[in-house]
Amino acid sequence: MRILLINPNTSEEFTKRVQEIADRYAFPGTTPVAVNPRSGPKSIESVYEELLSSVGTLEIGIEELDNYDAFVIACYSDHPTIYALREITDKPVIGIAEASMYAACMLGYKFSIVTTNEEWEPLLWDAVRHYGLTERCASVRSTHMPVLALEENPKDTYDLIAKTAKLAVEEDGAEVICLGCAGMAGLDKHLEKELNIPVMDGVVCALKLLEGFISYGVKTSKLRAYAQPEYKPMLGLPKIFQSVYRKPNTEE
């Protein structure tokens, strides 16, 4: 099976990290491939940047629809391209945030998310509510560090994430920690030993769920929410974005 992991930002360092983690955990017979858009923001820390990243992310997804069995959107947010891709393919599409939160609920009653900057807190609470998990989320705590700082000083970064996670456990009642950024991939097992509770890496959670879905032979429902979009003319956009519409019944 072939699984495409799309990092929606343009940080090649983050993409390499996603690839390393996917290679480490993929089952024999699974080929994971991590990519990022050719243009867009280097990090995603706001709704504005989330939307700016969507065009490049969708473009990659459309180009590769026939080449992979499933798709991961490797951004820890309720990224709009998750749902757009579900509309244009019946192959499974999963975001790393929803994958880690649902997995966390099966390993403990309350989970907390440890994320980067403070601006992500309300956005992730919105995601928690969208996934129907408000009662299961103990807290969303930020480390007050920008996303790109994750690349700069690994030891200080780890210490800050560990300190924030401990506060979530001791003060908020978290039984499971979700790492709230793709840039935190690979820190889970070190934190598990320190905290003595499960720590969810969203990249691994999404990969494992998709391997299961593919093996089980299940696909995305096209009945209502993720039905293929109806054809309509477009202005000023690359033709690739029109290629996924249901074919019109009559000529334009």
Image (cartoon, rainbow, N blue to C red):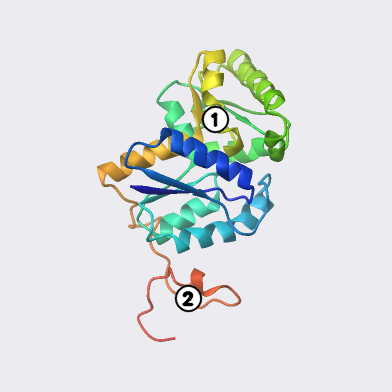
Which quadrant of the figure has residue 114? top right
Which residue position holds label 2?
232
Badge 2 amino acid? Lys
131 left or right, relative to 140: left
Q: Residue at x 52, y 54 (%)?
A: 81
| Mark 1, other Cα within 10 Å: few <14 / some 14–19 / many ≥20 | many
Q: Nearer the viewer, residue 90 or 34?
A: 34
Q: Looking at the picture, does residue 201 appear above or below residue 210?
A: above
- State whether residue 76 appears in this view: no
Which residue position holds label 1?
186
Q: Residue at x 68, y 39 (%)?
A: 147
**Percent position of residue 219, x then y:** 31, 50
199 left or right, relative to 172: left
Q: Looking at the picture, does residue 6 appear above or below residue 121?
A: below
Q: Secondary structure at mark 2?
A: loop
Which quadrant of the figure has residue 156? top right
Q: Residue at x 45, y 38 (%)?
A: 23
Q: Secondary structure at mark 1?
A: loop
Q: Nearer the viewer, residue 145 or 142?
A: 145
Disc 2 or 1, which lies upstream in sequence?
Answer: 1
**Percent position of residue 53, x then y:** 62, 55
Cα separation, mark 2 vs mark 1, equals 43 Å
Badge 1 amino acid? Gly
